Amino acid sequence: MKEEYEHYKTIRVIEYSMVVVALMVVLIIVLPSLNTIIYNMSKDSAITSTKNTIDAIKSIYTNMNLINEVGLPFKAIFNKDGYTFYEMDQKVNYKTTINIKIDGDLPKSGSITINEDGTVTAKDLIFGNIKCNQVKDQDLICDKK
């Protein structure tokens, strides 16, 4: 009777070990795909937030031009404390009257510039672990920082 119990106990240990090995194999196969999915979602979110932020800066520039002529280049610099506007390389205090409101997150750092020729340059906009750049209305490039 003791031998039978030991035999079943050994079989159970082997079965549990096989289950653990099977789960580890599944994790090894699935984990890279899961990381890729998470990265792609973060990248898509950063692209959307960058486009929304660029549109918001264009809108702010247009609105400020309706009130008072605004010189170019017009720049918004983002940092951990928020953002600061510059007009013709001079710091201006529009922040007290205008808040950037977008669907998505504002960048943690970087800058958006409306150039003298009307094109937009986004430089080193950081969203989590994704950095986005756009040079003079060319394609937006976002990748790991």
Image (spheres, grey):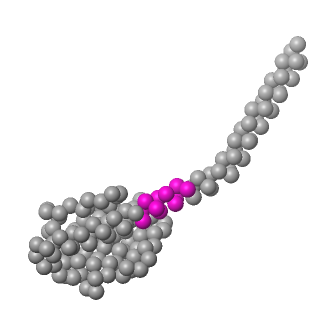
Image-quadrant location for residue 62: bottom left
- Residue at image position (21%, 82%) is 72
- Seen as rendered, the residue at the extreme left is 68
Above or below for 42 versus 9: below
Residue in front for this viewpoint, 46 or 118? 118
Instruction: Examine the rendering and report whether any part of residue 5 can be seen.
Output: yes
Residue 49 x %, y % = 37, 62
- Seen as rendered, the residue at the extreme front is 66
Above or below for 58 versus 16: below
Residue 111 x %, y % = 31, 72
Looking at the rendered image, the quarter that the N terminus falls into is top right
Residue 40 sits inside the magenta stretch: yes
Image: magenta residue range: 37-47
- Seen as rendered, the residue at the extreme bottom is 117
Residue 73 sits inside the magenta stretch: no
Is 130 left or right of 58, judged from the image as shown? right
- Residue at image position (82%, 27%) is 10
- Seen as rendered, the residue at the extreme top is 1
- Residue at image position (62%, 55%) is 33
Q: Count the marks: how many? A: 0
Residue 57 x %, y % = 26, 70
Image-quadrant location for residue 52: bottom left
Residue 110 x %, y % = 33, 70
